[in-house]
Image (tube, grey):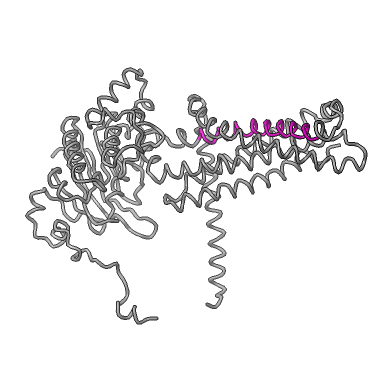
Amino acid sequence: MSERQDIIRIENVRFAYGERPILDELSLTIRRGEIIAIMGASGGGKTTLLGLIGGRLIPSAGKVFVEEQNVPSLSKSALYALRRRIGMLFQFGALFTDLSVFENVAFPYREQTDLSEDMIRTLVLMKLEAVGLRGAAQLMPSELSGGMARRVALARAITLDPSIMLYDEPFTGLDPISVGIIGRLIKRLNAALGMTSVIVTHDLNETLRLADRVVVLSAGKVYCDLSPDEIRASTDPFIRQFADGLPDGPVPFHYPANDYVGDLLAS
Amino acid sequence: MKADPIALLTSLGHAVTSRLDRLGLATRFAIAVFSVLGVVFVRFGLIIRELYFSGVRSLSIVIVSGLFVGMVLAVQGYEVLQRYGSTEALGVIVALSLVRELGPVVTALLFAGRASSAVTAEIGLMRATDQLAAMDMMAVDPLARVIAPRFLAAIFSLPLLAALFSAAGIVGAWIIGVKLIGIDDGAFWSQMQASVDVRIDIVNGVLKSVVFGVAVGLISVFEGYFAVPTAEGVSTATTRTVVTSSLAVLLLDLVLTVMMFRGLN
């Protein structure tokens, strides 16, 4: 595999929130054009990883290369130049609540380009058509269902035709139909726009249908890096607990605590 | 639990350093905001929207309050002045009180309650719902797009609102003093005109308003920007904006008054 095909390269990254270590010497390479799913227990550093790729978080050690640029060392203007080629879908969409659907999608055009009003209108309607919501252009975010809001946010994230899309829990809180719609959109957009997609998710079913590669994080490191078929066939207890949704296993059900009986009698 | 002197010292030290830490954060934030102000002037439309929300929508409360404060000043002033047989000076007393002190100070306090609290809550909720993060990821600086326009709107609106407050107050005093009590109309206005100095009284009053605008504006955007992204965090930040702004205005007023009016005459 040649270097040029690695669009994101994370090398020996450490990150901690205060005293709590999140990522520990994590290394990961993401190739151009693939859809990669990052899975792992809550609080396991998945969203942190997206923050590092987007340059919103700075690692305490290690390097994060995106398109051959070391993100933590970029100046603000260089970072903003890079971010114009990165789209991000936030967990609950993060639509601007004071702007209509149309204006939300038009926002990147108005801020980043000198396009004419006619051109912006055409482009916005095309993006909204791509997510099936051209008819909702004049609604306000408060009038949308959760699934619709997520689709509008997706349309907004792809306005500038990014080469990398970051998805933070794109399926959380959605009904099964919306999950299917978003999943199909991710796959279709990835192919149609030639993007690379990094998806942080808990939804294993949708992930296995969607991703080229599944990376499971544990204890701040990459636990395994497998194809969907390999995940399905795996007998590893940690992966099985994940795949089958077992409450207890290598990831304990109980938060670490004192001895139960001792605790109850301690009064 | 017995008081442990070391623990006491530790918590005292922690209280001091955490406050210094926040002060340092506020200073760095202020510098960052000032450094993007130029960008905002190029896109004045962003400020106009905030001027409408912070300034225009505060008009009614400011004018009505000014009217009442002026009326009260007239009643109280008349009580005292008639003891010395100089009720015609009522206009002067009222105008000077309003232009030098009450106009800038009370307007700033009203503004903190009416507009700044809303700004803090809005920015805090934008943070809590990832709107600021989304903007940042779209390579749009939230400081320039969201923070700076709201900050500038406070600086622009406060002096104008204070002027309207003082004007309404003078009208209120005129209604009570001239129309109801029966002080001579000509004396009321001419004494006021002769005694209110443009530089000493009006310019200083406006200057106070501008300083209050900087303080109140900065506090509101700072508290919103660094609000803990939860319901409780936003409500705490909103409360803190009103409390800190009010105290800052009163303290700054003392300092400015001493600098401006001490040793006059």
Toward the viewer: A99 or A241? Answer: A99
Q: Residue at x 90, y 36 (%)?
A: B86
Choose top left, top right, bottom left or bottom right for residue B11.
bottom right
Left or right: A168 with respect to B101?
Answer: left
Picture quarter with the N terminus of chain A = top left
Q: Is residue A190 left or right of residue B179?
A: left
Compared to B141, does A203 lie above or below? Answer: below
| Residue under the point 22% across and 29% down | A130
Quadrant position of residue A165: top left
Q: Position of residue B131 (x, y in %)?
A: 38, 40
Q: Position of residue A94 (x, y in %)?
A: 35, 40
> How many discs mark residues in the rendered view?
0
Q: Please name whichever residue, A18 or A24, is drawn nearer the observer in this view of the structure.
A: A18
Q: Residue furthest right?
A: B85
Q: Residue furthest front?
A: B180
Quarter placement of the C terminus of chain A? bottom left
Q: Which residues are magenta?
A: B148-176
Give above or below for B35 relative to A53: above
